[in-house]
Amino acid sequence: MSPRHVIAFDADAVPARDIVTDDPAVVDVPFVAQSRRHFTQVEKGAFSGIWEAPPHRERVDCDYDEMCHLLEGRVRLTDAAGQAREFGPGESFVVARGFKGTWENLTHVRKVFFILS
């Protein structure tokens, strides 16, 4: 049991929710991600948890800020100008509101995320 106002990201504490992404305007090949939201504060536009998905490439147009910490796998983010950066296990980064480009899971990815919209 955690102290009041402390939220542990225990894997079995929150059921995984399957998220199907199959819009051809967003992805070339449909995929299913699993998300566990451990923290949500709708009034602040904030939520956090653990997300995982197989290799895929999706087009993104971020209208939110997202902090990511990779637990497993490798991703490549490429902006509209073609500038790319890869991240791997143990690395953290923020995808800031206004990012337009692609998010590519080069391998199966598992990450901790915090989104502020």
Image: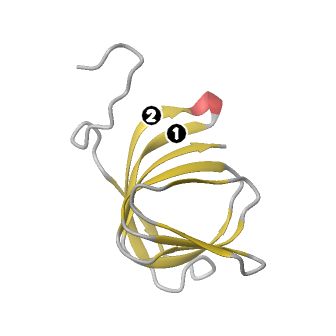
Residue drawn at the location 72% of the way across and 62% of the way down: 99
Locate residue 98 relative to residue 88 in the image: left or right. Answer: right
Judge by depth and name the residue closer to the eye, 66 or 91.
91
Residue drawn at the location 49% of the way across and 34% of the way down: 40
The residue that mark 2 highlights is: 39
Vertical order, 73 against 67 (above or below): below
Q: Amino acid at mark 2?
A: Phe
Residue drawn at the location 69% of the way across and 59% of the way down: 62
Q: Amino acid at mark 1?
A: Phe
Pointer 2 local density, CA inside 10 Å: few below 14, some 14–19, many at least 20: some
Vertical order, 93 against 77 (above or below): above
Q: Position of residue 60 (x, y in %)?
A: 65, 68
- Marks 2 and 1, the one that precedes in the sequence: 2
Secondary structure of the residue carrying tag 2 is: strand
Residue 92: give its label.
none
Q: Position of residue 42 (x, y in %)?
A: 58, 33
Locate residue 105 relative to residue 94 in the image: left or right. Answer: left
The residue that mark 1 highlights is: 47
Pointer 1 local density, CA inside 10 Å: few below 14, some 14–19, many at least 20: some
- The answer to which quarter of the image holds residue 37 is top left
Judge by depth and name the residue closer to the eye, 42 or 58.
58
- In contact (CB < 8 Å): disc 2 and disc 1: yes
Locate residue 30 relative to residue 110 in the image: left or right. Answer: right
Q: Looking at the rendering, in which quadrant would you find the N terminus?
A: top left
Q: CA distance from mark 2 to mark 1?
A: 5 Å
Q: Position of residue 61 (x, y in %)?
A: 70, 65
Q: Position of residue 77 (x, y in %)?
A: 60, 71
